[in-house]
């Protein structure tokens, strides 16, 4: 479009100026709504600001001390103290070994390595556990959702009567707000026979009608994962369905002619061509799962925290806006790292 | 044709956008404003105009509370036609209510005028509340229990009017006690355990597989602090943090009673009791599936209601005593405070005085079983007729045990969290009592050491 070998034409420059002007409102809104709060949180993470502190507390700059508190961990060895009559070794107690000055370290977990026992201590054990629980939850639910979603998408992709209705109906779990469906599940998971699951299980002979799903440490995460899989598989199915529909039927017909079996077709045609959609769907789901708040907050409140509900608790319960901002920033960095990882691994074109 | 299509789609987009904007600007939603800006939102108009002044009251909605609050608002509006009283519903769990209030205070929002505050909050929230003495509170304060007025006075400022006093009580099934040959409610925790075991075994044999001996609040929240403080105080005679900020949670009496409580889970109390709050436990009790129930007074009138299986079959008594202490009931109760950021603090204070006045407290006492904070009402005939237990338990209320929120302000929440988290781990069997409380002691001492 240029003339005389010079730079962009006058018209092009004018259009560029107009474009910038038209984009200005969106950019301003973006700055105010997204960038300012983000920046404010980032700034607050370096201070000891109090939430609703009013005039009585001044915020002072404390550098990285909030981050040190959240990430402060230590490993100490627990030496054996004596042997009991049943030949069990009794070790030192964690609270005698973990440091207390200048900062208190509390136990996260104990483990054995090479026959020696160690304790992992942290300044903020709730945060460490929240990160661990959120990770487990994310990995499990994303894997399950992808597999199930792919299955459902392939089923709904084939031609059968009522296909349109089926596609609409399968979206219902995802359409209900998470808080509402978490409440529904809360009712069904009640620990006495008021709850649906206990009634069903006791009818078939398990549990006697008293399984307390939400207070049993080993059942808590599986339950949350089940709730999330129920809710979000439709979303995955939808995204994968869109990808499946882009694959031309001719390829399958050609493969049939060549004598390839269904499984071979799936592995050689479907999966490779589905990769872009799969990548996008995975990125969405993983980032969403890492930010999980509603399911944890509604079903487990304080019993088991996710990274997001930990941040909320710090802010509202303890009013430590500085610490909770730091926690928010760490979550952001973690999610960012995952996003970058996905882009590299799955080759999503940017 | 194409132009028409485009027009329609632009038109529908604009309609959706404008609807969305209108929805965002609705009343009653906490708008988190940047601290620098101080713009007003919501539907307030400055006082003095002929238009209506809107006073927003954040009230509790547990059980029957919401209906009562609406009726109270109506009565005020009848007497003061130029004021519109709007109710803002707050969540069930106490901590969540605090969250809602803090959001309004952080934003310095004029959308909230009067707030219902828990007995443990005046210390923390004082800086956001007006001094009610400046609006004529002296006229009313000597009618109320002195202890609560004192609790609500921070640095000489009265930041909240006492509204109702709460204390933990033991609800028990009179018909079942008679059936199994017991002459009266249990006096000690051992007695309660034994009676609950017997009644539960008997009822289960008769076919009620859902019956439990004793239900209470065992979830990991402030309610557990209340239940646990009652156990601890009744057995050891002291609080978990003394008035001089000394942490006392590892003495043998305290450990003993926590171990007893842990033994109830799964035997006389359902395994799910460690996930039950006030309402969860009440569900089991009101369906007729519990012999004993620890809860606040609000359950009384609900249990007498039409849809209750236990109507007419129960009574209340003070909680059992332990070894070295006396029967202890945790002091609860709610107060009404006026936000400093309200546009009409004078009118808001007037609303607060009205709601906490003698007439309104009497109505609440009769219709909801809320215990008034006005002393003279405990001798009022109509009140005693509706809730005879109030007369019986007057001494309990006057001697109720307060949680150590004053000594540990402004970090009471952290101290309480350490306490209830430790006790919850004992109840679920995750840790043994001594280890859990020793770790709790270290944690609480650490928190207290950061107080001035």
Image (cartoon, helix red, strand yellow):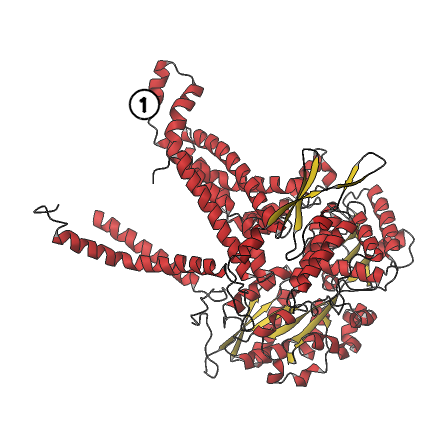
| Residue B87 in sight from this viewpoint | yes
Is B309 located above or below residue A284 in the figure? Answer: below
Lateral position of residue A80 relative to residue B106, left or right: right
For label 1, the residue is A250
Q: How many marks?
A: 1
Residue drawn at point x = 68 percent, y = 67 percent: B408
What percent of the width, then of the height, locates residue B222? 68, 59
Residue in the picture at 51% in, 35% down = A143
Subunit ID for the residue under disc 1: A
Nearer the observer, B39 or A162? B39
Closer to the camera, B259 or A44? A44
> In this view of the protein, which residue sits in the foreground, A233 or B218?
B218
Percent position of residue B139, x then y: 67, 85
> Height in image: B258 above or below A290?
below
The answer to whether any part of residue B306 appears in the image is no
On the rendered structure, is B258 left or right of A325?
right
Q: Helix, strand or loop at disc 1? A: helix
The residue located at (72%, 75%) in the rendering is B148
Q: What is the crowding at mark 1: few (fewer than 14 residues within 10 Å), some, or many (at least 20)?
A: few
Q: Quadrant of the C terminus of chain B?
A: bottom right
Horizontal arrangement in the rendering, residue A328 relative to residue B441 (left or right): left
Q: Position of residue A172 (x, y in %)?
A: 48, 42
In the depicted structure, whether residue A47 falls above or below residue A274: below
Q: Position of residue A221 (x, y in %)?
A: 61, 41
Residue closest to the far left? A4
């Amino acid at each position: 479009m240029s003339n005389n070998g010079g730079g962009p034409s006058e018209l092009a420059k004018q259009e560029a100026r107009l474009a910038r002007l038209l984009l200005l409102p969106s950019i301003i809104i973006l700055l105010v709504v997204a960038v300012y709060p983000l920046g404010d949180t980032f700034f607050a993470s370096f201070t000891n600001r109090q939430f609703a502190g009013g005039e009585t507390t001044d915020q002072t700059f404390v550098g990285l001390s909030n981050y040190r508190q959240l990430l402060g961990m230590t490993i100490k060895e627990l030496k054996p103290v004596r042997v009991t009559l049943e030949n069990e070794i009794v070790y030192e107690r964690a609270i005698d070994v973990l440091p207390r000055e200048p900062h208190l370290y509390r136990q996260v977990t104990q483990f054995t390595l090479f026959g020696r026992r160690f304790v992992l201590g942290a300044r903020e054990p709730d945060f460490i556990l929240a990160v661990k629980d959120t990770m487990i939850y994310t990995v499990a639910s994303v894997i399950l959702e992808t597999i199930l979603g792919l299955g459902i998408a392939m089923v709904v992709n084939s031609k059968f009567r009522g296909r349109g209705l089926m596609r609409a109906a399968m979206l219902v779990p995802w359409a209900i707000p998470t808080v509402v469906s978490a409440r529904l599940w809360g009712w069904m998971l009640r620990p006495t026979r008021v709850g649906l699951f206990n009634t069903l299980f006791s009818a078939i002979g398990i549990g006697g009608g008293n399984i307390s799903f939400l207070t049993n440490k080993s059942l808590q995460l599986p339950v949350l994962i089940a709730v999330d899989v129920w809710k979000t598989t439709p979303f995955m199915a939808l995204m994968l369905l869109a990808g499946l529909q882009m694959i031309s039927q001719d390829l399958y017909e050609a493969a049939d002619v060549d004598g390839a079996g269904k499984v071979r077709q799936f592995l050689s045609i479907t999966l490779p061509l589905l990769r872009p959609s799969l990548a996008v769907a995975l990125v969405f789901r993983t980032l969403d799962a890492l930010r999980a708040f509603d399911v944890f907050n509604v079903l487990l409140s304080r019993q088991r925290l996710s990274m997001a509900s930990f941040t909320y608790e710090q802010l509202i319960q303890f009013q430590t806006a500085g610490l909770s901002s730091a926690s928010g920033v760490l979550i952001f960095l973690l999610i960012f790292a995952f996003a970058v990882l996905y882009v590299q691994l799955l080759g999503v074109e940017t | 044709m194409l132009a028409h299509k485009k027009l329609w789609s632009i038109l529908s987009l604009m309609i959706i956008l404008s609807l969305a904007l209108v929805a965002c600007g609705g009343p009653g939603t906490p708008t988190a404003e940047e601290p620098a800006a101080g713009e007003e939102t919501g539907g307030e108009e400055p006082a003095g105009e002929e238009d209506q002044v809107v006073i927003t009251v954040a009230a509790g909605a547990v059980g029957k509370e919401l209906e009562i609050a609406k009726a109270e608002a109506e009565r005020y509006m009848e007497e003061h036609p130029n004021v519109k009283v709007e109710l803002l519903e707050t969540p069930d769990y106490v901590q969540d209510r605090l969250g809602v209030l803090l959001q309004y205070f952080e934003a310095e929002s004029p959308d909230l005028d009067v707030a219902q505050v828990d007995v443990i909050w005046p210390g923390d929230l004082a800086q956001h509340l007006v001094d009610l003495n400046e609006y004529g509170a002296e006229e009313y304060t000597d009618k109320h229990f002195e202890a609560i007025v004192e609790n609500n006075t921070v640095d000489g400022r009265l930041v909240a009017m006492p509204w109702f006093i709460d204390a933990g009580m033991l609800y028990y099934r009179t018909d079942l006690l008679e059936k199994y040959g017991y002459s009266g409610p249990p006096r000690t925790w051992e007695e309660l355990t034994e009676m609950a075991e017997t009644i539960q075994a008997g009822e289960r044999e008769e076919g009620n597989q859902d019956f439990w001996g004793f239900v209470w609040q065992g979830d990991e929240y402030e309610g557990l602090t209340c239940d646990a403080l009652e156990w601890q105080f009744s057995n050891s005679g002291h609080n978990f943090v003394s008035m001089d900020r000394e942490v006392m949670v590892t003495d043998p009496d305290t450990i003993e009673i926590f171990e007893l409580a842990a033994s109830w889970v799964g035997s006389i109390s359902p395994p799910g009791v460690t996930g039950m709050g006030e309402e969860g436990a009440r569900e089991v009790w009101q369906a007729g599936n519990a012999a004993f129930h620890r809860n606040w007074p609000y359950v009384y009138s609900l249990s007498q209601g039409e849809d209750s299986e236990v109507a007419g079959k129960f009574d209340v008594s003070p909680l059992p005593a332990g070894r070295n202490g006396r029967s202890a009931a945790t002091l609860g109760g709610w107060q009404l405070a006026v936000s400093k950021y309200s546009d009409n603090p004078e009118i808001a204070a007037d609303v607060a005085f009205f709601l906490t006045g003698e007439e309104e407290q009497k109505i609440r006492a009769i219709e909801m079983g809320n215990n008034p904070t006005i002393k003279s009402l405990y001798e009022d005939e109509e009140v005693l007729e509706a809730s005879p237990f109030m007369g019986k338990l007057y001494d309990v209320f006057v001697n109720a045990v307060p949680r150590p929120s004053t000594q540990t302000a402004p970090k009471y929440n952290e101290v309480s969290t350490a306490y209830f988290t430790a006790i919850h781990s004992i109840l679920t069997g995750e840790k043994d009592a001594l280890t859990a409380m020793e770790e709790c002691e270290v944690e609480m001492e650490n928190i207290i050491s950061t107080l001035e």
